Amino acid sequence: MNIQWENLKNRLMSICPSCPIPFYFDPVNPPTSAQVYLLKLFSVDRKGLLHGNNIFELLLAEDFEHGVSSLPLVAAEELFSLELCDGEFCSHELSPDMKKLRKANVNIDNSLSPSHTLLQIQCVDQKGLLYDIMRTLKDCDIQQTDGKKIVDPVKQDILSSRLRLEMLHPMRVMIANRGPDIELLVANPVEVSGKGRPLVFYHVTLALKLLGICIFSAEIGRHKTSERQWEVYRFLLDDSLELPLANSQSRSQIVDRVRRTLMGL
């Protein structure tokens, strides 16, 4: 792939302060994989720097999880586990008006078409809804080898449960301790093609910027569970006078705002 490095440099410098900013790319010693690049950008720190410079989505190869620290076991279990409670998926605490998102109905109808299975999905509208539906259908590989309708009750149940799960929890958001520090964790499923969800970094940094929360450092990596691969965004947060991170109510407010921004609510 022919990457226009000079254009990238010009776009970055156009939105940065007027002071000189070093920009490095070493063409003599390229990385071993043609899909992995390291961009180093040095500038004076300021509020909203990561969000303001997010003019390109960070695209990395599938094995780039080796470059970030592994998730603590307790945090990983809470982030990726979901339980079915009273017929609904229960995970992280939602604000009262966000709990309506747990109302998602999926009906599979084989009576309206002689050759096709009809999926009827009722849920709250949210950003990326069609993307999540189509991604789930693709990941489930529902294509019948005989080209006929989906009549197997087991396959219907698996498809219905998976769709409901993705409608209710397309992304996972939580705040956890990382040693003496506090980090925000945001995870989304990786497509079978290896692609992650678009614009996650942009929307998370936007939410934090609007809350006045500064980011000390940010990492993006991949985490594999028994069922799928996840793209995980880790943000070490600076403490705030308005939203002290030691306060559980402040943590809930941050998680709620990030989730709302990601889902367009």
Image (tube, rainbow, N blue to C red):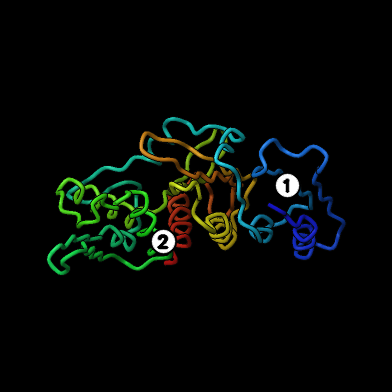
Q: Nearer the viewer, mark 1 or mark 2?
A: 2
Question: Could you tell whether 106 is left or right of 171 in the image?
Answer: left
Determine the residue positioned at 25% across, 56% down: 147
As shown in the figure, which amino acid type bears the numbered disc 2?
Answer: Tyr
Secondary structure found at label 1? loop
Residue extending furthest right? Answer: 20
Measured from the top left, where is residue 196 in percent x and y?
Answer: 50, 50
For marks 1 and 2, give the CA distance. Answer: 29 Å
Which one is nearer the viewer's eye here, 223 or 48?
A: 223
Question: Could you tell whether 124 is left or right of 128 in the image?
Answer: left
Pointer 2: residues within 10 angstroms few (<14), some, or many (20+)? few
Measured from the top left, where is residue 8 in percent x and y?
Answer: 75, 58
Identify the image quadrant of residue 221: top right
As shown in the figure, which amino acid type bears the numbered disc 1?
Answer: Leu
Residue extending furthest front? Answer: 146
Residue placed under numbered mark 1 in the picture:
39
Pointer 1: residues within 10 angstroms few (<14), some, or many (20+)? few
Determine the residue positioned at 68% across, 52% down: 1
Looking at marks 1 and 2 on the same chain, the residue that comes earlier in the sequence is marked by 1
For residue 205, above or below residue 218: below
Mark 1 touches mark 2? (CB < 8 Å)? no
Residue placed under numbered mark 2 in the picture:
131
Which one is nearer the viewer's eye here, 79 or 64?
A: 64
Secondary structure found at label 2? helix
Identify the image quadrant of residue 57: bottom right
Which one is nearer the viewer's eye here, 173 or 161?
A: 161
